[in-house]
Amino acid sequence: MFAKIDSGLFAGRASLAAMAILLSTHSEGALAADAIAVNSDDFTLPPEPSRFGRFEQKLADWHVVLGGGAIIVPKYEGSNEFKIMPVPFVTATFLDTVTIDPTGANIAVYEQGPFAFSTRLGYEMGRKEDDSDHLRGLGDVDMGATVGVKAAAKFGPAEIFAQLDKTIGGSDGLEGRVGIEVIRPLSQSLMIGASVSAVFADENYMQAYFGVTPEQSRSGLARYDAGAGLKRADFSISATYMLDENWMVRGEAGVGVLLGDAADSPVVVEKIQPSGMLLVGYRF
């Protein structure tokens, strides 16, 4: 009845943030990506070419997943208020090399043994001052495009990774993350995962989201200069359950802890940033 989970399917992972990123500010999107990252491989078993008729060969090269659910995140990074949003999404992986998802496109550049290197094109959604009353008078952080790289090494069920993303436009910032993720099957139909990571950012990024300029201080918040450094630490756990050969359910809970200049910013109301997500997916 249930599809057997092959841990090898999780070797080539591509991070899929919730579609909420498309509908919200960068801060919310960052929380979704940081604390509730979804692996496209979690929804992907080897396709059956015979199901696709005369297009079987072309479609067999693609792993396509459609799904939806709900996510709960703070209204912005540092908020003490939350919002629940619907999360529709689609992801497609071609020959384990190119993955397209709601956050952008990932391209596998190098893979040898346990080591892998990839590049990424995406976007930063920015932040709107009307996302919260606490942000009024700070102005908006504009949307920008992002380019990034990621290096990873797998050791059994664990993956150690480091990634770096540069925003062009918007905050014009640089953000990096280092961490470790462990994914293990508990049965033929259940997979669990856990991750921990640290996020760093340059002065442009920190000032855009956590700084308060003299002009912005008219909002009532004290002037504040946010410098480069450690921004936050993230922890998450997840469970993926295969209902049958095609359908699956995934739940994930995470918490982020703002650190350094981000934690001390007057923009931040709450340093502890919990989040959660529940998704149902169907693979083709």
Image (tube, helix red, strand yellow):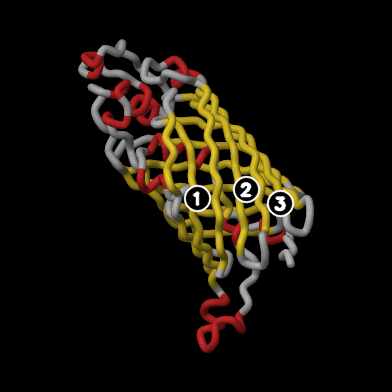
Q: Position of residue 43 (x, y in %)?
A: 60, 59
Disc 2 and disc 1 in contact, CB within 8 angstroms: no
* Corner quadrant of residue 247: bottom right
SS at badge 3: strand
Residue farthest right in this picture: 187
Is disc 3 surrounded by few (<14), some (14 to 19) or many (20+) residues within 10 Å?
A: many
Residue 31 tag number: none
The circle drawn on residue 69 is 1
Task: Work out how far the residue at label 2 is from the one at label 1, CA to CA, in angstroms.
Answer: 29 Å
Q: In front here: 79 or 93?
A: 79
Query: Would residue 68 appear left or right of 48 to someone viewing this image?
Result: left
Callout 2: few (<14), some (14-19), or many (20+) C-alpha neighbours within 10 Å?
Answer: some
> Can the viewer see residue 98 in this picture?
no
> Can I make out residue 105 in this image?
yes
Viewer-proximal residue among 13 and 65: 65
**Kind of residue indicated by mark 1:** Gly
Question: Residue at point 44% right, 54% down?
Answer: 88
Task: Please state the horizontal and vertical placement of residue 137, each as a whole percent of the image.
Answer: 23, 22
Looking at the picture, how far across and down is residue 16, in whole percent?
Answer: 51, 51
Q: Nearer the viewer, mark 3 or mark 2?
A: 3
Disc on the earlier residue, 3 or 1? 1
- Residue contact between numbered discs 3 and 2, judged by CB atoms under 8 Å: no
| CA separation in Å, label 3 and label 2 | 21 Å
In this rendering, the answer to whether 253 lies above or below 230 is below
Q: Disc 2 vs disc 1: which is toward the camera?
A: 1
Q: As shown in the figure, which amino acid type bears the numbered disc 2?
A: Ala
> Which residue appears at 48% of the width and 37% of the height?
72
Q: Which residue is mark 2?
A: 152
Residue identifier under label 3: 191
User: At x 20% / y 17%, what residue is drawn?
Assistant: 215
